[in-house]
Image: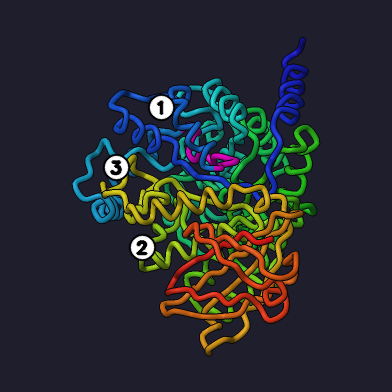
């Protein structure tokens, strides 16, 4: 049997073996720091993905996790690591987030990739496949990175395929501007608003051969995983790429493409693996809509929900929640790029309230490793650990309950409805509410996203029955008897302290 046939059968087998959950719950694990953490916790060396204990995977399954996004599994080169260990600006940053760090703690950026094969520090491609199979046995998907914009400056393609990269415009003579180009004239990676990223080399998406090579990389990833998280996916949109690199490329031999790379790439991968999921990191106006039109299944809700939760302007937040199509958005309150939720939102209570909003809306529910323990120290992507800190027990208890509550099928297969909080004593504006329903299974979510107690009436049109009915508040495990007709007509009266969340089961 030829290798191509074997590959095709493997893809078919994968698509049949795993089915994605609606509104999936995922957690991001930074691969090398995660193994280092496990080694410290267990007291034994865990150096490959195949050595992750079954107990860890069982814990994720029991927590209601449907997918693990394993960040940073691909091969890196010595250039990036040397730079990360010697660059003065980076070193100052390490000292701030990890006082007392050592050179051994600096492991190199996972976004300066030499080629899409497993980093030897984590094992091999076979170890990735083995982990995927173990996750599948627990009903969990595996998501890996795809970094489309650039490679490491010492990537394989730099010598084998230099035409895959953006070069200084024809007619520009050396020496080239060192803030934009390498001595060879190949451009450093960047976006239209940043300076150069000097550990990376910029790929040329006007070169059709590069596009084909990147589709092949995605097809390879689709043999190892169930989905891909695409780093800064908006940079490959034709309009943004032209904005960034049109000055170099318009005088070149490459004309601007007439089709979007992402539309072509997603179509090619899904033709072989229809269940493969594409998750886009994206921000800036208009890019969510453009990338969704290209076929992305989920997109970061950064400019929308995350920024609205950060700002705290409740009218804007309510308007966004009431009117946004959330089914294809990935909601989070922290990830490897953002500060920890407790640091970003200012207190554990507000961070918990923000998480309750993000995790109970339709779409992908996105956690980051350490979030459940209430960590406040950032894990820098160049480092293998963050500063040590004790578990925040109240935060850990909150997430234990939230994970258990939102693991119920109604939060994944049910219908979502935004509900209005009517005035009771002039403080209803502090509260937001929505419901989930699936047959007789129903949930009401009410969040006080403010620093003062609020009271409101929440009208719940689909309450069943007549006379008095019993409702169950799931965080406190308390039950209440209320009038079904009153809940339908004038509304259930809810009283929430600052930053408090209540989730009710009702008939």
Residue 243, given in percent of the width and then of the height, sits at 63, 63
Q: How is the image coloured?
A: rainbow
Q: Nearer the viewer, mark 1 or mark 2?
A: 2
Check whether the beta carbons of the residues at disc 3 and disc 1 lie within 8 A of each other: no
- Near mark 3 (Cα within 10 A), the count class, few <14, some 14-19 or many ≥20, is some
Circle 1 — which element? loop
Tags 1 and 2 touching, CB below 8 Å: no
Q: Which residues are magenta?
A: 64-75
- Residue 430 visible? The answer is yes
- In the image, is 442 to the left or to the right of 196? right
Q: Callout 1: 10 Å neighbours few (<14), some, many (20+)?
A: some
The answer to whether residue 248 shows anywhere in this view is no
255 is within the stretch colored magenta: no
Q: Which residue is mark 3?
A: 85
Which comes before the other along the chain, label 1 or label 2?
Answer: 1
User: Can you identify the residue that label 2 sits on?
Assistant: 343
């Amino acid at each position: 049997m030829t290798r191509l046939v074997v590959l095709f059968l493997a893809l078919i087998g994968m698509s049949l073996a795993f089915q994605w959950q609606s509104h999936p719950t995922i957690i991001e694990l930074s691969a090398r720091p995660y193994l280092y953490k496990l080694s410290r916790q267990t007291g034994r060396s865990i150096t490959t993905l195949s050595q992750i204990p079954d107990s860890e995977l069982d814990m994720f399954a029991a927590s209601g996790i449907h997918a693990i996004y394993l960040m940073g599994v691909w091969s890196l080169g010595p250039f990036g690591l040397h730079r990360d260990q010697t660059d003065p600006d980076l070193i100052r940053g390490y000292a701030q987030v990890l006082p007392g760090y050592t050179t051994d703690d600096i492991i190199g950026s996972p976004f300066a990739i030499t080629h899409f094969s497993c980093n030897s520090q984590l094992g091999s491609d076979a170890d990735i496949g083995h982990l995927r199979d173990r996750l599948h046995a627990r009903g969990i998907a595996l998501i890996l990175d795809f970094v489309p914009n650039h490679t490491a400056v010492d990537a394989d393609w730099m010598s084998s395929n230099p035409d895959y990269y953006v070069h200084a415009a024809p007619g520009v003579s050396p020496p080239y501007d060192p803030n934009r180009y390498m001595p060879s004239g190949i451009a450093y990676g960047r976006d239209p608003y940043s300076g150069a990223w000097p550990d990376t080399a910029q790929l040329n998406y006007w070169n059709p051969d590069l596009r084909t090579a990147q589709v092949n990389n995605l097809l390879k990833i689709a043999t190892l995983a169930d989905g891909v998280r695409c780093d800064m996916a908006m940079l490959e949109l034709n309009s943004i790429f032209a904005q960034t690199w049109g000055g170099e490329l318009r005088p070149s031999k490459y004309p601007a493409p007439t089709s979007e790379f992402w539309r072509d790439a997603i179509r090619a991968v899904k033709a072989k693996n229809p269940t493969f999921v594409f998750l886009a990191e994206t921000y800036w106006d208009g890019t969510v809509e453009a990338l969704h039109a290209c076929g992305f299944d989920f997109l970061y809700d950064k400019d929308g929900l995350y920024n609205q939760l950060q700002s705290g302007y409740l009218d804007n937040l309510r308007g966004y929640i009431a009117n946004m199509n959330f089914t294809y958005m990935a909601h989070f309150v922290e990830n490897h790029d953002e500060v920890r939720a407790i640091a970003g939102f200012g207190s554990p209570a507000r961070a918990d309230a923000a998480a309750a909003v993000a995790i109970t809306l339709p779409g992908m529910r996105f956690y980051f490793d350490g979030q459940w323990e209430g960590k406040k120290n950032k894990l820098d992507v160049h480092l293998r650990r963050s500063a040590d800190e004790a578990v925040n027990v109240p935060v850990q208890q909150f997430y234990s309950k939230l994970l258990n509550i939102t693991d119920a099928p109604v939060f994944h297969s049910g219908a979502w409805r935004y509900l209005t909080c009517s005035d009771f004593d002039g403080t209803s504006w502090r509260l937001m509410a929505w419901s989930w329903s699936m047959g007789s299974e129903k949930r009401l979510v009410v969040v006080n996203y403010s620093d003062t107690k609020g009271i409101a009436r929440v009208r719940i049109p689909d309450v069943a029955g007549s006379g008095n009915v019993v409702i169950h508040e799931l965080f406190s495990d308390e039950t209440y008897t209320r009038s079904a007709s009153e809940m339908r007509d004038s509304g259930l009266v809810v009283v929430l302290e600052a930053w408090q969340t209540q989730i009710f089961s009702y008939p």
